[in-house]
Image (cartoon, grey):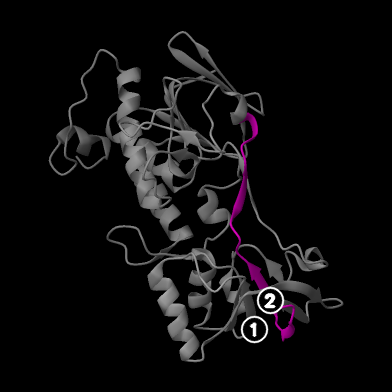
Amino acid sequence: MIKTDVLVIGAGPTGLFAVHQLGIIGLKAEIVDNLDKIGGQCIELYPDKPIYDIPAIPECTGEELTNNLIEQLKPFKPNIHLNERVEEVKKDKNFWIIKTNKGKEFQAYNIIIAGGVGSFEPRKFSAKGSEKFEGKELFYSVKNKVIFKNKTVCIFGGGDSALDWAIELSNTSKVILVHRRDDFRGAQVSIDKVKQLEKEGKIQLFTKYQLNSVDGENKLEKISIKHDDGNLKDIKTDYVLGFFGLIMQLGPIANWGLNIDKKTIPVNTENFETNEKGIFAIGDLCSYPGKLKLILSGFHEGALAARGCFKLARPDETLRFEFTTTSKNVLNRLGKK
């Protein structure tokens, strides 16, 4: 059995930063993730997608953010158990006993759920024949944007992912953006940018249209889109990208005694603890009034959850707030002195 102060479920950006915050205050953490690589959705779904809302970093990709977080963690040397899924969680006196699908057991004072317990699957096109081209010319995420260079790319969706990739790929590709409504759901600055690029002729925009059919023999040759009024339009394209959000399957977490509400876990905003003492939830999975699903919000949640963990892992000690710029204890943990 592996004994630790905290088991963090999820090796995405939020989970990684939580481990950093745990290390800063002297707590040991183990990480479990059901993916085969570190980085969570950032790496699995959009490693090349630009991210703009990380403080002091004007722009970075999901892969760059992940690599920087891994570098930040090195002083604390956490063990990361990949391709492993938490199946069972049960209370044993002052500890939680956690078992994975590979038979591994952990004993921890605390658990921080930062994703990784469920599976995230993209919402897919319903148009007949679309599955034939999936993974070849039709994708629901971008893992290598180089393949789209000097090609025609038809992007479907009205949220941040669709808008961001339309803007990004317009630099090197012919971009056609299709959305089923006139109104977009993304950030206003991105909406304004897309409309500006449309005026400049760098993006073609079709609203109130949806994918009707996908055609081609050995490779995708053209698609048909259908307007709300029933009119059809054929478009020749090399690639199709669909960004309709993710469907989250909670999996075993549903059996852990948590007060799950609409596939999210309600938490308090003092330390992001759930209804189960010693189990914390951060990132997209947790819910509370005013919740913003941003990576920077997850970082804030992870910092406070780490302090909540300290009270249970070190009940006889007092956690004193220390600035990382001046505290010798903190600097020692970071290997700076």
Place of residue 216 in the rendered image (x, y in percent of width and height, measured from the top left) = 83, 78
Place of residue 225 in the rendered image (x, y in percent of width and height, measured from the top left) = 72, 77
Residue identified by numbered label 1: 152
Residue range in magenta is: 228-252
Q: Nearer the viewer, residue 128 or 97?
A: 128
- Outermost residue on the left side: it is 326
Q: Nearer the N terminus, badge 2 or badge 1?
A: 1
Judged from the image, the secondary structure of the residue bearing numbered disc 2 is strand
The answer to if 230 sits in the magenta stretch is yes
Residue identified by numbered label 2: 239
Place of residue 168 in the rendered image (x, y in percent of width and height, measured from the top left) = 49, 75
Q: Residue at x 20, y 20 (%)?
A: 318
The answer to if 246 sits in the magenta stretch is yes
Q: Residue at x 59, y 68 (%)?
A: 157
Tag 2 and tag 1, C-beta contact below 8 Å: yes
Please say whether residue 120 is visible from this viewpoint: yes
Q: Nearer the viewer, residue 6 or 272?
A: 272
